[in-house]
Image: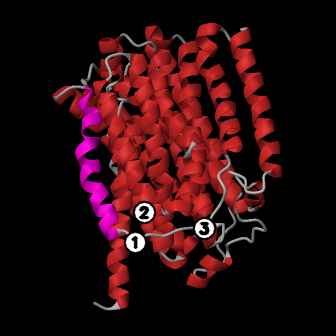
């Protein structure tokens, strides 16, 4: 076997196995969406508790991403990736065995920790295996499968919930993890990045800052937006965020090197990814419930009714990944998020009165095409903006921003939903929540305008467009 052929085989294994890991953790972000109604009835959960079954996972996921990327760079990306898969599988067992909402939320927190190890290491292994001129297509496939897992979560969760029980949405992770771990150790070559010190102080500050803000949003409707609890949470979160920025500015090897954000493409790509995921997660959280409330669908049928949205990822995301290498990221990010906004506003308008399911099909397709275009492009813009030796930390920061967007999206939409009447006025509350999804998408499109246009389509341009960064952690 020639060296060139051997490298090609390795790249295929890396792409396949990292995609499996990404699909596992992305699926569990919102696989509970179609099961939320069942969980609410089975465990007597409130809207706040339902939020936390999603946000506990997303929050722990987001907060440890950069730390996990640093650990992987130091101890070996393949080894750390396999350890993350193992932790994720064990936590999935705990989720399946949970007999109360608090236990489920706790197990979801540990599941998020495992996911925080898997995702950035998957992206780091992918970035290390593919040269810049071929990375766009690989990221397109990877992102397409990841996005399909996020959007397909309600359908899979609905099928499993209706066919078996909601606990089985977690049991299915166990055999997949058991098969993937030995394959990872056998077929993925080990790689490391520049050894970096961990930044526990930075990790603690940003974790508490985000927790304070999210807590205030989640508790706003129940405790009152003017209550000491909510105001105190926002103030404390804001102060801790300022403390985090001051800490990172002075840390010798910061968790989030602020110098990275001097790159306009890096900053714009991360901002666009934040708003894209905020709108996406918020929409998935409510759309599956809307199908059940408006049309009397069971969990499986509700998931199937979202297929016009999810099926677009099979075709559009891989094409978008190839287009990134030819025309650059900005056109795809801006156009994709604008289409997602159109789809969300459209659904908000048609769902405000008595409708037939057929009226939702076209806006679902429009929104699906939009997110399928934008997802690989935002990821490529963020990671490709920095030198190759920074791919590990760049992927960790991007993943963190994306998951924080998911937390913020679910929290904000749930607050809007609750303020508009909640489950007692479901249709009215839903339409307002989906309108906010449209606004978040438009903000992402505006952020995408900050990504520099590609000046050349030659492979060298992919390297040339990387903006210099003075400090690499």
In the rendered image, which quarter contains the N terminus? bottom left
| Magenta region | 166-187
Report the residue marked by disc 1.
189
What residue is rendered at 57% in x and 36% in y?
A: 438
Sequence-wise first label, 2 or 3: 2
Residue 321 visible in this rendered orientation of the protein: no
Sequence-wise first label, 1 or 3: 1
> How crowded is the residue under tag 3: few (<14 C-alpha within 10 Å), some, or many (20+)?
many
**Callout 1: SS:** loop
What residue is rendered at 47% in x and 74% in y?
A: 130
Foreground residue among 432 and 418: 418
* Residue at the far bottom in the pictured view: 2
Report the residue marked by disc 3.
384
What residue is rendered at 39% in x and 63% in y?
A: 141
Mark 1 to mark 2: distance in Å? 7 Å
Sequence-wise first label, 1 or 2: 2
Marks 1 and 2 close (CB-CB < 8 Å):
yes
Mark 2 to mark 3: distance in Å? 21 Å
Foreground residue among 349 and 396: 396
Marks 1 and 3 close (CB-CB < 8 Å):
no
Report the residue marked by disc 2.
78
> How crowded is the residue under tag 1: few (<14 C-alpha within 10 Å), some, or many (20+)?
some
**Callout 3: SS:** helix
């Amino acid at each position: 076997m020639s060296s060139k052929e051997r490298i090609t085989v390795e790249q295929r294994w890396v792409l396949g196995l990292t995609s499996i890991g990404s699909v596992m953790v992305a699926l569990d972000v919102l696989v509970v969406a179609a099961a939320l109604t069942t969980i609410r009835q089975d465990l007597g959960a409130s809207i706040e508790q339902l939020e936390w079954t999603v946000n506990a996972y997303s929050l722990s996921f987001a907060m440890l991403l950069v730390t996990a990327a640093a650990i992987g760079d130091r101890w070996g990306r393949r080894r750390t990736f396999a350890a993350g898969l193992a932790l994720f599988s064990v936590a999935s067992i705990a989720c399946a065995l949970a007999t109360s909402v608090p236990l489920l939320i706790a197990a979801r927190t540990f599941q998020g920790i495992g996911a925080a190890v898997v995702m950035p290491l998957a992206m780091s292994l992918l970035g290390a295996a593919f040269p810049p001129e071929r990375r766009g297509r690989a990221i397109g496939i990877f992102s397409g499968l990841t996005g399909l897992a996020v959007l397909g979560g309600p359908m899979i969760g609905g099928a499993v919930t209706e066919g078996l029980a909601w606990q089985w949405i977690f049991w299915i992770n166990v055999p997949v993890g058991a098969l993937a771990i030995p394959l990872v150790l056998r077929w993925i070559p080990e790689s490391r990045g520049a050894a970096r010190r961990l930044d526990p102080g930075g990790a603690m500050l940003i974790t508490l800052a985000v927790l304070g803000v999210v807590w205030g949003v989640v508790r706003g409707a129940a405790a009152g937006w003017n209550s000491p609890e909510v105001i105190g949470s926002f103030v404390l979160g804001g102060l801790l965020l300022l403390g985090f920025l001051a800490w990172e500015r002075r840390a010798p090897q910061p968790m989030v090197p602020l110098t990275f954000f001097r790159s306009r493409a890096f900053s714009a790509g991360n901002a666009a990814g934040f708003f894209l995921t905020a709108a996406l997660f918020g929409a998935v959280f409510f759309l599956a419930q809307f199908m059940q409330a408006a049309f009397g669908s069971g969990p499986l049928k509700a998931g199937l009714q979202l297929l016009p949205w999810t099926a677009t990822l099979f075709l559009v995301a891989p094409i978008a990944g190839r287009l990134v290498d030819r025309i650059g990221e900005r056109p795809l990010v801006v156009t994709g998020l604008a289409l997602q906004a159109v789809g969300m506003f459209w659904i908000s308008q048609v769902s405000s009165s008595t409708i037939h399911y057929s009226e939702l099909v076209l806006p679902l397709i429009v929104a699906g095409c939009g997110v399928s275009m934008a997802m690989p492009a935002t990821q490529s813009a963020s990671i490709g903006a920095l030198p190759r030796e920074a791919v590990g930390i760049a992927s960790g920061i991007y993943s963190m921003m994306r998951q924080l967007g998911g937390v913020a999206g679910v929290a904000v939409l749930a607050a809007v939903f609750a303020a508009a009447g909640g489950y007692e006025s479901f249709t009215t509350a839903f339409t307002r929540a989906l309108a906010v999804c449209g606004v978040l998408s438009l903000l992402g499109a505006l952020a995408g305008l900050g990504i520099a246009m590609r000046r050349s389509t030659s492979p060298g341009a992919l390297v040339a467009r990387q903006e210099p960064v003075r400090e690499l952690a």
